[in-house]
Amino acid sequence: MSTVSATVLLHGQLDQPVELTVEQLRDLPARRVEVSFDCRTSGSQRHGFEGPMLWDVLRAAGPRIDFTRRKARLRYLLTVTGADGHCAVLSWAEIDPEFGGQQILLATSIDGTPLDETGPQLVVPDDACGARYVSGIQAVWVGSLPG
């Protein structure tokens, strides 16, 4: 019996907007992180996540960003939206190795449990609060501020 794998749409200012399954995300180079964060409703949380870095996933989709212009990259934003409508906003500079270089993941498993059916989870290891740990991700949008 096969399970249906959830998908995540990568769209916005990308050369190759694409919809990827959790299984396809799992085929990308993965990182494993152990994190702890505070959740307002569930208290202190500690989990192990595994999945590709958001930076790698988006670079493969070809963001329409001039990488020779550092300051121009600072106007790009990312929105990550979950199945429940929860949305988190990140700046491109947070994931760009020439700026923040954070190891933010699109996790394909939590504590060894695959997320194929529910969808990937955004993992922001440096956050003390779990509000940006968006679960059941359905879409990641990349776009720039006008100006």
Image (tube, rainbow, N blue to C red):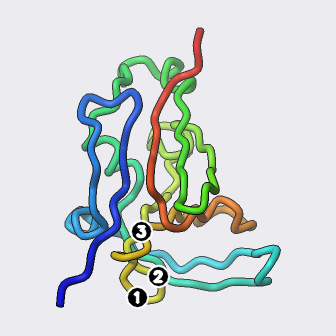
Quarter in which the N terminus is drawn: bottom left
The answer to which quarter of the image holds residue 120 is bottom left
Percent from the top left, x then y, of residue 132?
Answer: 65, 59
From what the image shows, is residue 85 above or below residue 68?
below
Percent from the top left, x then y, of residue 112?
Answer: 40, 89
Q: Amino acid type of disc 2?
A: Ile
At a point 76% along the width and 75% down the height, the residue shown is 38
At a point 43% along the width and 62% down the height, the residue shown is 106
Measured Cα–Cα span from mark 2 to mark 1? 5 Å
From what the image shows, is residue 70 above or below residue 29?
above
Q: Amino acid type of disc 1?
A: Thr
At a point 51% along the width and 37% down the height, the residue shown is 92
The answer to which quarter of the image holds residue 45 is bottom right
* 32 horizontally vs 62: left or right: right
How crowded pointer 1 is (Cα within 10 Å; few <14, some 14-19, many 20+) is rated as: few
From what the image shows, is residue 48 above or below residue 67?
below
User: Which residue in the rendered view is the most extreme toward the top?
Assistant: 147
From what the image shows, is residue 65 above or below residue 62?
above
**Between residues 4 and 62, which one lies in front from this camera angle?**
4
Measured Cα–Cα span from mark 1 to mark 3? 12 Å
Q: What SS does tag 2 mark? A: strand
Badge nearest the viewer, 2 or 3: 3
* Residue on which disc 3 sits: 119
Percent from the top left, x then y, of residue 78?
Answer: 52, 40
Q: What SS does tag 1 mark? A: strand
- Residue 113 badge: 1
**Between residues 118 and 92, which one lies in front from this camera angle?**
118
Percent from the top left, x then y, of residue 98?
Answer: 46, 37
